[in-house]
Amino acid sequence: MLDEGDGPDRSYRLLVEAERLARTINTPSVGHPAGFQSWSLKEVVTTLALINPGEAERVARTITAPQCQAEALVEVADALWEAEPLRARVLLADAERVSQAIGPHEGFLRGRILVRAAELLARMDPGDAERLARATNKPTVCRVEALTKVAGVLVEADAGRARMLFADAETIARTLDHEQERALAWIAGGMARLDADEAERLARTIPDPYAQGRALREVTRALTERDVDTAERLARTITDPLRQAQALEVTAAALATAAPQRARKMLTDAERLARTIHQPWYRARTLVRVADTLAEVDPEQARRLIADAERFLSTEHHSSPVLEDAAKMLTKVDPREAERLAQAIPEPRHRAKALKKVAEEVARTDPNDAERIAHTIAPGRSRIQTLVGIAVARALAVHVHRPVEGEDERSV
C-alpha cells in the first residue's frame, strides 16, 4: 500500500485512498480473477504517475492482470521519458515483456499496448521504436497503427524516415482483408502533419463515401493544429453527412475558445447534418458529439441536443453506450439532469458506468455530491470502482490547481 505519511500533497493522499479502495475489489472478471481490481489500480497509476512516478511504478508492478500491468507501466514511462529516459525505456521493455502473457484471444488488446509503447519509445530511440512497431503483428492492423504512430513522432525530426514509414504502413494496410479502410484513415491522419496534399490524396483513394469520410475526418483533425481554414474547407467537401458532421465538430472544437461565433456556426451545420442521418443510433451519437463541443459556446442548445438524442434512442437496442456518453457530457451543463439520464439506463452494468462518469465529472467541483451519486449504485464492485474514480478525479483536479469546492485540507 502507498504510505500516506510520505505523500507530498493532498493529491497524493487522495490517491492513497483510491488505492486502498481499489484493493478491496475481489470480484473476478472474465479472463482474470483480479481483472476488476487491476483495472482500478491502473486508473490510480495513471494519475499517480503525474505526481510521484516512483510510487506509481511500485503500484503498477503489484497489478496482477497482465493487460492492466502492461498499460500501467507504459503510463509511468510516459511520465518519466523526459526526465529519466533510461528508466522509461526499462519500463517500456518490461511492458512489452508483460504483454506477452496476455492470452492469444486478446491479441488486439496486446497490440494496442505495443502501439502506445512504440509511439512513446520513438521519442527516445526511433530505431528501437521501429523494431517494436514491425514486431507488432497480431493483429496486423496494429502493426499499421504502430508504424503510423512512430512516423508521426518523427515528422519534425526526420521527415524522410517518417515518409518511408507512412509508405510501409500503407503497403501493409492495402493487404488487409478487414480493417483496411480504418487503417488507411489512420495513415492519412498521420501523414497530414507531414504532407496535407498527400494525405488528402490517400484518403480520396478510398472508394466508399462513408469510409473515405472517416479518413478525411482524420486529415481534418490533424489540420486543425496548424491551419483551421484548410481544415474547414476539407471538412465541407466530405460527402457522407455523418462524417462531415464529425469533421465540422472536430474543427469547431479547435475554435471554440478563440472564435466562439465561428465555432457556433460550424456546430449548427454539424447539427443540421446529424439530423439527416437515417439510422437513429448514429443520429443520436453524432448529436451527442456535437453537444459536447457546443456546451462551451451554447450550453442551452447542447442540453436540447442531448434531450433529442435521448428521444431518438428510446426505441433503439444497444443504446446504453451512447446514453453513457450523453450523461457524461450533460454533466458539464446540468449535473442533476445528467444523473437522471444515467439512472434511467435500464441495464445495471451500463447504468453503473454512466453514474461513474457523472460522479467523476461532479467530483471536480463537488466531491460530496459525487460520493452521494456513487452510493446510489448497488453495493459491490461497481460502487467501489466509482469511489476510486472519484478519488482519482479529485486528485487530478488538485494536481492541476483546479479548486475543489466544499472541502479543505482537513476533509481529505
Image (tube, rainbow, N blue to C red):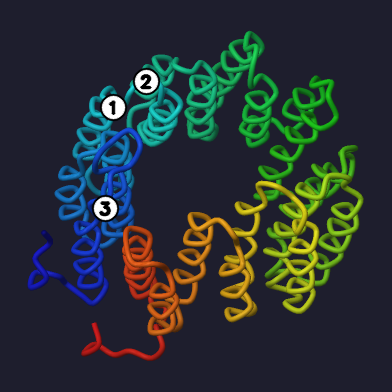
Residue at 37% across, 20% down: 132
Q: Position of residue 307 (x, y in %)?
A: 76, 69
Residue pointed to by mark 1:
96
Give, as a three-letter code, the residue at label 2.
Leu
Along the line of sight, which residue is nearer the eye, 220 or 334? 334
Q: Residues within 10 Å of mark 3 (few under 14, many from 20)?
A: many
Give, as a three-letter code, the residue at label 3.
Leu
Residue pointed to by mark 3:
41
The quadrant in which residue 263 appears is bottom right
- Mark 2 / mark 3, whichever is N-terminal: 3
Q: How far separated are the C-alphas under marks 1 and 2?
A: 9 Å
Along the line of sight, which residue is nearer the eye, 379 or 276? 379
Give, as a three-letter code, the residue at label 1.
Glu
Q: Residues within 10 Å of mark 1 (few under 14, many from 20)?
A: many
- Mark 1 / mark 2, whichever is N-terminal: 1
Residue pointed to by mark 2:
132
Contact between marks 1 and 2 (CB within 8 A): the answer is yes
As displayed, is residue 251 above or below residue 363? above
Q: How many marks?
A: 3
Q: How far separated are the C-alphas under marks 2 and 3?
A: 26 Å
- Mark 1 / mark 3, whichever is N-terminal: 3
Q: Position of residue 3 (x, y in %)?
A: 8, 65
Q: From the viewer's perspective, is 217 left or right of 59?
A: right
Q: Of tags 1 and 3, which is closer to the observer? A: 3
Along the line of sight, which residue is nearer the eye, 218 or 367? 367
Residue at 62% across, 30% down: 186
Q: How far separated are the C-alphas under marks 1 and 3?
A: 19 Å
Q: Find numbered disc 2 in the image and state the secondary structure of the residue it sits on.
A: helix
